[in-house]
Image (tube, helix red, strand yellow):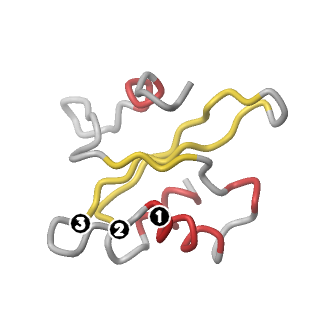
């Protein structure tokens, strides 16, 4: 939740979700899924990485940032994170 809040705090981000990707050394590392704010310029992965670097400890920083048009949701609006873990680049 902290990582998601930091990413969502970026002025070019509409919303974000974070899931864990298996890692041989750390057990799991964060992967971020970001929906850019359509009203502004598209952020780059480098911009968001720098943003996170200034606000999060190294262990909490996303190892990968994936841009999406929208996050998958249930009928009541909850983010379906299990679908995000199936995205390319998370495994």
Residue at x-position 21% and y-position 47%? 69
Label 1, label 2: how far apart the Cα atoms are = 11 Å
On the image, numbered disc 1 is attached to which residue?
7
Q: Which residue is mark 2?
A: 43
Q: Residue 42 in the image: state x and y as whole percent.
A: 27, 67
- Residue positioned 62% across, 48% down in the render: 63
Q: Secondary structure at mark 3?
A: loop
**How many C-alpha atoms fall within 10 Å of the one at disc 1: few (<14), some, or many (≥20)?**
many
**Residue furthest out toward the left:** 39
- Number of the label disc, if any, that sits on residue 37: 3
Label 3 and label 1: CA atoms lie apart by: 12 Å
Q: Are marks 3 and 1 in contact (CB under 8 Å)?
A: no
The local crowd at label 2, few if under 14, some if 14 to 19, many if 20 or more residues have their Cα within 10 Å, is: some
Confirm or deny contact between disc 1 and disc 2 (CB under 8 A).
Answer: no
Q: Earlier in the sequence, mark 3 or mark 1?
A: 1
Image disc number at residue 55: none
Q: Find residue 84 and report its horizontal and vertical position in percent.
A: 41, 31
Q: CA separation, marks 3 and 2?
A: 9 Å
Of callouts 1 and 2, the N-terminal one? 1
User: What quarter of the picture does the C terminus occupy?
Assistant: top right
Q: Secondary structure at mark 2?
A: loop
- Say whether residue 44 is left or right of residue 69: right
Q: Position of residue 48 (x, y in %)?
A: 48, 66
Quadrant for residue 52, please give it: bottom right
Q: Secondary structure at mark 1?
A: helix
Q: Is residue 28 above or below residue 61?
A: above
């Amino acid at each position: 939740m902290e990582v998601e809040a930091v990413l969502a705090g970026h002025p070019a981000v509409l919303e974000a979700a974070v899931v864990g990707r298996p890692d041989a050394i750390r057990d799991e590392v964060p992967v971020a899924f970001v929906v850019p704010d359509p009203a502004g310029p598209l952020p780059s992965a480098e911009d968001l990485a720098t943003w996170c670097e200034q606000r999060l400890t190294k262990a909490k920083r996303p190892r990968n940032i994936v841009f999406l048009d929208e996050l998958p949701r249930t009928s009541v609006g909850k983010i379906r994170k299990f679908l995000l873990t199936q995205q390319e680049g998370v495994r």
